[in-house]
Image (cartoon, helix red, strand yellow):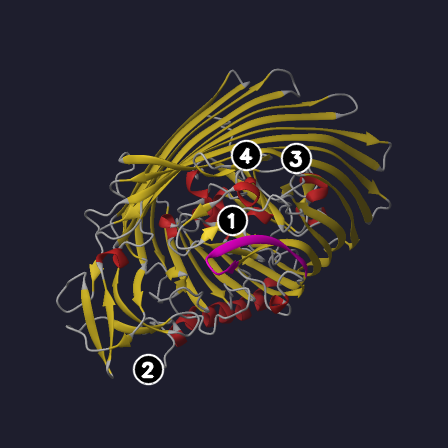
């Protein structure tokens, strides 16, 4: 018996009505183009630092770079910083459950997994020292000045994690007295508020502080799917569904509303001690807590134990434990502290930054038989410390060279403890200490870059970095039976050569050949844990490497009102760290080689001050080529890499009101190494879907702001492993000094 629709529910997919905004954008674009020739507005040059570690115009950067400003962030209703990247070319965001998502990550250039993208906060890493993830839920939103996105391998400047690109979040320094109070509410019992204040004293000291909080009751994101068997059931209810492997299942309920709560506090201080020297301190502390409410049974009798007759001589059986499986509670706390000094002398500039990150995490998991009210469980507690130092000096050599030299040091310490719980929703009900994991690693690097202006129209960038890495004191296993692991050591050389050619004032062509790497993290090397499957570490993993080639161009038309950009890239991905399951054991290994090719196209058209139209398209062709460990994977698509991404939208301003409308299309995404995802638009799969968002922002006075936003405007039903977020309406107001 099969479900021919290959879906969990009948989809309210956008269909023709979802295409209406796209058609409207194209019509407006066509008419606007006729009047654009007489428009005399000029586009100001944006400056970035991420692509070269030195200040450059976006057009002159040797990489595909995008800058998101505070004004850009205001145009949409973003709950977390990673959501602000969702509409950018080449960037894929994994956050199907909004604020409730516990493992959000981003990917770029076909590099699936957040540990292959380096995320910086004011130039210092935010990636966890344990597994390379970024604590997006615990980072502040209100203090962001701009976000710089630099695509492509960047290990020549930044070392490990910078394989697919770099995202640099740059926070704001108050230059005058400012204050802000904001509050909002919306669908799913969502509430948000924030406070922020800052000032500059004696023209030399800037101080800013803020607090923001959000809570949501959530929605049922996790379904309870059961496999039919022969026999007659005692009741009716539920509905049929095929999973992403096109296997027939019956949905008997859900695991309750998936709720979440977050708050973040931040403090920034900067002191100008001389005309050119700036001392700065940044601090933030964030907490994200999540869990599930009482589960819901879809059986006609409302029970959590029994059987449902699904016809054709078949039934499904279920018990209370099925409604709480893996649906525990958890909390993450992340503290970031950074100190920096920037100074400029007669013949060189100096930047020294040091930072510390502390991440506390715990989560519970139900175990064995039992219900929402009484089931036992397990608790995993972990603590990660990361200390890093980054220093660089920039010195001109004559009129044509700018030399950048630097060094980098990072030290990570990780420890985790597992316990049995008498009740899975009470993290304090510990009964036995069962398992531990420990590990440390140390990274040291030296890097250099020469910016060589060979002519008035051509600049060459030559970069080289050496990274040495060692892990040690690795230990994992059941308490009293821990296994001690060896001390893996390795090193990598990451070269990069880039050129930027500016043959005409509005034409920019760039090309890059680069090699990047990522060392295995402490989770991959040492962490052992057990659920239905035993997940094993591998201390013998080799670092991942990618050799990439790209060529791109930016062209402006109509006095810079219209911008067209395109980038082609090809990457050879070697020793990718993969995992496979044999029996009840899951282990990690290095895949020999994969190939990734892609295309990114962007356009933005601003014919008048009141109208901005934009669109981008990304294509990824990412396949395994050679895999001695598991030859059956060869020729298969890489997992967690969307084949196609489309973003388009319009910003329309009238008086003190701004309307922003945007659409996002996500193509095929495989979750299985063997590409067994025969049905994508199904629970546990990733839907091919269009999602549309809109926000109306009103600023009737210089101090007052009102906004009304709609996420998933057409209430399209979709899946990103879990049930995707339904339509969400949110109202917010703010008062500013």
- Of badges 3 and 1, nearer the viewer stands 1
Q: Which mark is residue 1?
A: 2
Are there few (<14), some (14-19), or many (20+) residues within 10 Å of tag 3? some
Sequence order check: which comes first, mark 2 or mark 4?
A: 2
Q: Is residue 393 above or below residue 331?
A: above
Q: Residues within 10 Å of mark 4 (few under 14, many from 20)?
A: many
Please tell me which residue lies in front, 640 or 644: 640
Left or right of 203 on screen, residue 276: right
Up the image or down, 302 lies above or below 114; here it is: below
In three-dimensional space, the C-alpha distance between marks 3 and 1, rounded to whole angstroms, equals 20 Å
Q: In this rendering, is residue 500 above or below 363?
A: below
Label 3's element? Answer: strand
Q: CA distance from mark 2 to mark 1?
A: 37 Å
Residue in the image at 75% along x and 39% along y: 465
Q: Describe the element under mark 1 as helix, strand or loop.
A: loop
Pointers 1 and 4 in contact (C-beta within 8 Å): no
Question: Where does the magenta region start and end?
Answer: 581-593
The image shows residue 634 at horizontal and vertical percentages of: 64, 68
Real-space CA distance between mark 3 and mark 2, rounded to the nearest whole angstrom: 54 Å
Q: Residue at the spot x=51%, y=68% of the render? A: 667
Q: Main secondary structure of the magenta part?
A: strand
Residue 622, percent across and down? Answer: 63, 64
Q: Is residue 610 visible?
A: no
Q: Is residue 440 left or right of residue 423?
A: right
Total marks in image: 4
* Place of residue 400 in the rendered image (x, y in percent of width and height, measured from the top left): 85, 38
Q: Which residue is mark 1?
A: 536
Residue drawn where x is 22% and y is 60% of the image: 319
**Residue matched to label 4:** 439
What residue sits right under mark 3 in the picture? 470
Q: Secondary structure at mark 4?
A: strand
């Amino acid at each position: 018996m099969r479900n021919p629709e290959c879906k969990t529910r009948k989809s309210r997919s956008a269909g023709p009505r979802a295409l209406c905004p796209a058609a409207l954008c194209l019509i407006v674009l066509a008419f606007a183009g006729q009047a654009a020739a007489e428009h005399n507005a000029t586009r100001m040059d944006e400056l970035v630092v991420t692509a070269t570690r030195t200040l450059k115009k976006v057009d002159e950067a040797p990489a595909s770079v995008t800058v998101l400003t505070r004004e850009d962030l205001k145009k949409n209703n973003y709950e977390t910083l990673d959501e602000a990247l969702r509409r950018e070319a080449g960037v894929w965001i994994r956050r199907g459950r909004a604020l409730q998502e516990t493992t959000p990550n981003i990917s770029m250039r076909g590099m699936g997994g957040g540990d292959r993208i380096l995320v910086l906060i004011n130039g210092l890493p935010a990636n966890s020292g344990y597994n390379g993830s970024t604590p997006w839920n615990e980072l502040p939103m209100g203090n962001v000045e701009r976000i710089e996105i630099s695509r492509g391998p960047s290990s020549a400047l930044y070392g490990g994690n910078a394989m697919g690109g770099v995202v640099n979040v740059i926070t704001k320094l108050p230059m005058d007295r400012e204050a802000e109070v904001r509050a909002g509410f919306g669908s799913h019992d969502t509430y948000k508020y924030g406070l922020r204040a800052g000032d500059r004293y004696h023209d030399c000291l800037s101080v800013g502080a803020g607090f923001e909080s959000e809570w949501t009751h959530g929605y049922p994101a996790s379904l309870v799917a059961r496999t039919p068997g022969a026999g007659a059931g005692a009741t009716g209810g539920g509905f049929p569904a095929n999973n992403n492997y096109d296997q027939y299942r019956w949905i008997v309920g859900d695991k309750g509303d998936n709720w979440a709560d977050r708050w973040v506090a931040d403090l920034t201080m900067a002191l100008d001690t001389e005309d050119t020297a700036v001392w700065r301190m940044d601090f933030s502390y964030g907490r994200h807590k999540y869990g599930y409410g009482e589960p819901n049974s879809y059986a006609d009798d409302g029970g959590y134990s029994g059987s449902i007759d699904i016809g054709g001589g078949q039934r499904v059986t279920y018990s209370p434990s099925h409604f709480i499986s893996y649906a525990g509670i958890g909390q993450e706390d992340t503290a970031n502290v950074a100190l920096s000094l920037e100074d400029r002398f007669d013949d060189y500039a100096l930047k020294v930054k040091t930072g510390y990150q502390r991440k506390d995490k715990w989560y519970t998991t139900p175990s064995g038989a039992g219900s929402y009210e009484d089931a036992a469980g397990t608790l995993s507690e972990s603590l990660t410390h990361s200390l890093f130092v980054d220093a660089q000096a920039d010195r001109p050599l004559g009129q044509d060279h700018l030399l950048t030299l630097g060094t980098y040091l990072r030290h990570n310490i990780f420890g985790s403890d597992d316990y049995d719980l008498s009740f899975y929703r009470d993290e304090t009900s510990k009964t036995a200490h069962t398992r531990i994991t420990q590990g440390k690693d140390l990274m040291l690097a030296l890097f250099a870059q020469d910016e060589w202006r060979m002519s008035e129209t051509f600049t060459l960038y030559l970069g080289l970095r050496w990274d040495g890495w060692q892990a040690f004191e690795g230990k994992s296993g059941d308490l009293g039976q821990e296994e001690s692991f060896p001390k893996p050591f390795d090193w990598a050389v990451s070269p990069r050569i880039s050129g930027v050619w500016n043959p005409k004032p509005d034409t920019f062509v760039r090309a890059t050949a680069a090699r990047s790497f990522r060392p295995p993290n402490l989770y991959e090397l040492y962490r052992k844990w057990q659920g239905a499957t035993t997940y094993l570490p591998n201390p013998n993993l080799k670092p991942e490497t990618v050799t990439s080639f790209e060529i791109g161009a930016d062209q402006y038309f109509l006095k810079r009102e219209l911008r067209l950009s395109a980038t082609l890239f090809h990457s050879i991905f070697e020793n990718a760290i993969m995992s496979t399951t044999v029996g009840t054991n899951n282990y990690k290994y290095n895949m020999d080689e994969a190939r990734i090719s892609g295309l990114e196209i962007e356009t933005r058209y601003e014919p008048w001050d009141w109208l901005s139209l934009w669109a981008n398209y990304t294509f990824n062709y990412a396949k395994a080529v050679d895999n001695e460990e598991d030859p059956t994977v060869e020729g298969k698509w890489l997992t967690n890499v969307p084949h196609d991404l489309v973003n388009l939208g319009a910003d329309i301003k009238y008086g003190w009101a701004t309307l922003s409308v945007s659409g996002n299309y996500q193509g095929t995404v495989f979750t299985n190494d063997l590409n067994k995802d025969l049905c994508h638009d199904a629970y546990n799969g990733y839907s091919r879907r269009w999602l549309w968002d809109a926000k109306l922002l009103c600023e009737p006075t210089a101090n007052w702001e009102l906004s009304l936003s709609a996420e998933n405007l057409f209430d399209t039903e979709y899946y990103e492993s879990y049930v995707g977020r339904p339509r969400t309406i949110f109202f917010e107001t703010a008062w500013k000094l």
